[in-house]
Amino acid sequence: MHSPVDRREFLKLAGLGGVVLVSGCASTMGGASASADEEFYFVQLSDPHWGFEGPAINPDAQGTLKKAVAAVNGLSQQPDFIMFTGDLTHTTDDPKERRRRLAEFREIVGQLKVKDVRFMPGEHDASLDNGKAFKEFFGPTHYTFDHKGVHFIVVDNVSDPMAAIGDEQLQWLKADLDKQPRDARIVVFTHRPLFDLYPQWDWATTDGAQAIALLQTHDNVTVFYGHIHQENHFMTGNIAHHSAKGLMFALPVARSQPKRLPIPWDAAAPYRGLGFREVDAEKAPVRYAVVERPVV
Amino acid sequence: MKPRRRMLLRASLAAGVAAAAGPIAILAQPKPRIIPIQARKFTYEPAELTLKLNEPVLFQLTSADVVMGFSMPDFKVRGTIIPGQVTEVAMTPNKLGEFFFLCDVFCGSGHENMEGTMRVVA
């Protein structure tokens, strides 16, 4: 499986090993026809919570992330890049322990075959020190990059402990979007949902509506995020928002129970609810094929 | 006094009473019930509240250690609690049921379990 054509053929069969979701955008790209070399795929991993302890929730807390790394390394065609969407570590009140966890996490994911690996923080990594420790290990908490015709924007909605993006970053976001054509292919990574998924469980971004209003000025925007440790697919206007499974524990569906407590480990179905995803970026029409993968 | 004049007098008296009743009515607004709540890592005291429907309350919030939040998403009210200060949050519950309040300022390793319950009764 070494060509984009092979990859597309694979996706037709991917239902055998994972769930395929095709996320369309508002328009097709005009102009030149899509060339095969502009299609690619990346992997999203989220919420490994390195440092978490709780045998009833995950008795393999020390091994799950390593299994995920092995699973990604085992993909027959390697992704162009890998994105971690936050909560790399489980929170600790001790700044030294936070750095120790970040260092261990970095060492483990250093085993990934793909070396283009990008990171962003979750509130567990960054909310107690405004992202200071995270930056020491992984650099800026919000940034952009471009890959084969897609503009990626990483938005930090966790370094502020009040779950806000903040005016300064919103201005930065606006300035960046102003430079993109209206029909640019744009993918946004965040940790928290930008919309009010369920504020009663802290599943929201204080000023997320302002970010969505800015993003709505473009036709082809898709958001991938983490935080809620399960798949969720939601539209705000023409923007699709896709949350990812976690890599340490699953969380219940919003409103399904009174408290937001991790779902206990099921010995009959170990690692259930955990996983990562492949995202195929297709140009014409603009869409993203999402394949969910288990950890083992 | 002719009947018509008596009617006019009654009318003007009534108007005067009504005019006087304006400010009196405002003064007669019930004072909100004061409810002190202390936050500390990672609890509220008290963590269970019972409020009456349509009864105005004023939460007086303090923190024993770090900056905390107090948020009731179902009523779209919140406050940030700074240690050493009293944060006042006013609300009048306008719907019956059981609701959560939670800390919405990430405050430490127990933050995600820092919550309380508010029951609104008739």
Image (cartoon, rainbow, N blue to C red):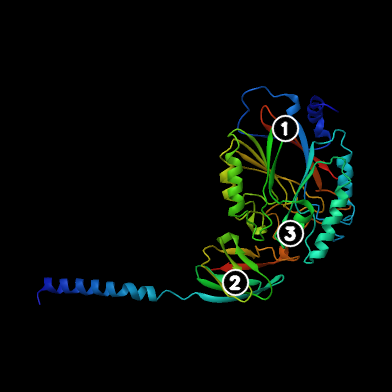
Disc 1 is placed on an element classified as loop
Check disc 1: other Cα within 10 Å, few if <14, some if 14-19, many if 20+: few
* Residue drawn at (62%, 77%) of the image: B84
Q: Is the residue at mark 1 from the same chain as the one at mark 3?
A: yes
Q: Quadrant of residue B39?
A: bottom right
Foreground residue, A10 or A105? A105
Of the two numbered discs 2 and 1 in the rendering, the one whose residue sits closer to the viewer: 1
Q: Which residue is mark 3?
A: A132
> Are the residues flagged by discs 2 and 1 in contact, CB closer than 8 Å?
no
Amino acid carrying mark 1 in the image: Lys
Q: Earlier in the sequence, mark 1 or mark 3?
A: 3
Residue holding disc 2? B50
Report x, y in % for residue A13: 81, 30
- The chain letter for the residue carrying disc 3 is A
Q: Tell me: residue A92, above or below residue B22.
A: above
Q: Residue at x 34, y 74 (%)?
A: B23
Q: Which mark is residue A148?
A: 1
Kindly report the distance in space between the C-alpha atoms of the residues bearing marks 2 and 3. Answer: 41 Å
Amino acid marked by disc 2: Thr
